[in-house]
Amino acid sequence: MKEVILCKYGEVILKGANRSDFEAKMLKQLRQRARRIGNYKIYYSQSTVYIEPLDEDSIENIDEMFYQAKHVFGFVGVSRAFACEKNIDTILEVVKTELAPKLKGYKTFKAESKRSDKRFPMTSPEISNEVGGAVLSSVPGIKVDVRNPDVIVRVEIRENEAFVHAGQEKGAGGIPYGSSGRGLLLLSGGIDSPVAGYMMAKRGVQLEAIHFESYPYTSERAKEKVLDLAKALTNYTMRLRVHVVSLTKIQELLRDNCEEEYFTLMLRRYMMAISLKLAHDYDCEAIITGESLGQVASQTMKAINVTNSMTDIPIFRPLIGMDKEEIVRIARQIGTFETSTLPYEDCCTVFTPRHPKTRPELEKVIEEQNRLPFEELVKEAYETKEIIVVKQFGENKFE
Ligand code: ATP
Ligand code: MG
């Protein structure tokens, strides 16, 4: 039985003059993914995008295409429809044999029909009536409820075929990837930063990522873990460029020259300065972190201000008001949680102070900073940068 995939627009419907730009991005992203899977026709009609397989292989790989469609930002619902010949007997047969098994467990339903081919010899209410009857006779215990049904069974009579479907799965939501400009994600191996990246990507930010390592204090495996997290994000972004910068020298110098309780704050100022430089070089208009207010000593309001004051572009902290529990729920949903909780060291955990400052004063921070040639060290660290392009389809590429 041939199936097609239907993707329902979300917020994009509300867009005015530039709606077509948004639509073009969503279609492009579906097409890029489809190309990897098979031969699909993808087109738009009445707030829905249709994905039709054009050959046997593509029909066979429809599960994979469905998975892809659920990861494209901008669609709120994705469903699968059976495509069949445009005559009422065939349609009813499909409802009874293909659709009915999927409707088990629902208590109430409503049938709806749409005829874009007006030559079809029945009106929409007549079709709905027949279809409703077929559902009632083939799904034990189900009842009609036209006001508040658990599921809507839909029949669409289109130009060449009829589509029969029921129920839809949640789409990725948000607005199209890349429609809000570019942002630089500070990606650690923890639970929070991948979630922060996902949340901003969902709001249309095209991601660039930077990861700080401290080899040999941090291991090769710790870096691979971060690349695995980046890989999980490519379910949504298709590809993600990860810049890996070494902080080893800076950390050793800080250990030997800086007051212990200021160590983490100083490190964060270096991270921010290096990130800013990269953001400028790669046209990123914002920096994204996984900070959540009060979670650790470096995320108190005062500590956040110590790094905040350094930048001339906004820092987005989508998790700022979220509890760990809420963050973990999203991490599980986007498939990063398992990797994030693998026990590898992060550069932030190398030489951590026993009593980090929670209420630092900026003046004192600057004094600490001036013990070392800040700008020079930032520049030197930036030069250690290596680039790894992580792709959803295919191997990582080292540039
Ligand atoms: P996460 O779970 O994301 O590691 P965290 O709770 O461990 O966060 P911190 O270590 O204070 O918090 O880091 C705060 C934010 O700083 C992170 O969410 C991330 O955006 C950034 N960050 C921390 N360490 C690194 C790193 N090694 N490389 C890149 N960014 C980092
Ligand atoms: Mg961390």
Image: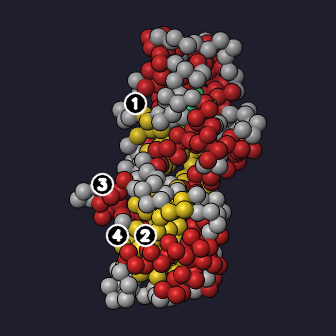
Judged left or right of residue 234, residue 280 is: left
SS for tag 3?
helix
Q: Residue at x 71, y 44 (%)?
A: 338
Give the labeled residue for mark 2. Answer: 112
301 horizontally vs 17: left or right: right
The residue closer to the viewer here, 240 or 97, is: 97
Residue 46: image tag: 4
Disc 1: which residue: 311
From what the image shows, is residue 97 above or below residue 365? below
- Mark 4: amino acid: Gln
Residue 126 image position (x, y, % from top left): 40, 79
Q: CA distance from mark 3 to mark 2?
A: 24 Å
**Three-letter residue code for mark 1:** Thr
Res 323 quadrant in image: top right
Which residue is found at the position 61% from the left and 40% from the top?
Answer: 329
Q: Label 1's element?
A: loop
Mark 3 and mark 4 lie on one chain; the one further toward the N terminus is: 3
Q: CA distance from mark 1 to mark 2?
A: 54 Å
Q: Earlier in the sequence, mark 1 or mark 4?
A: 4
- Residue 14's disc is 3
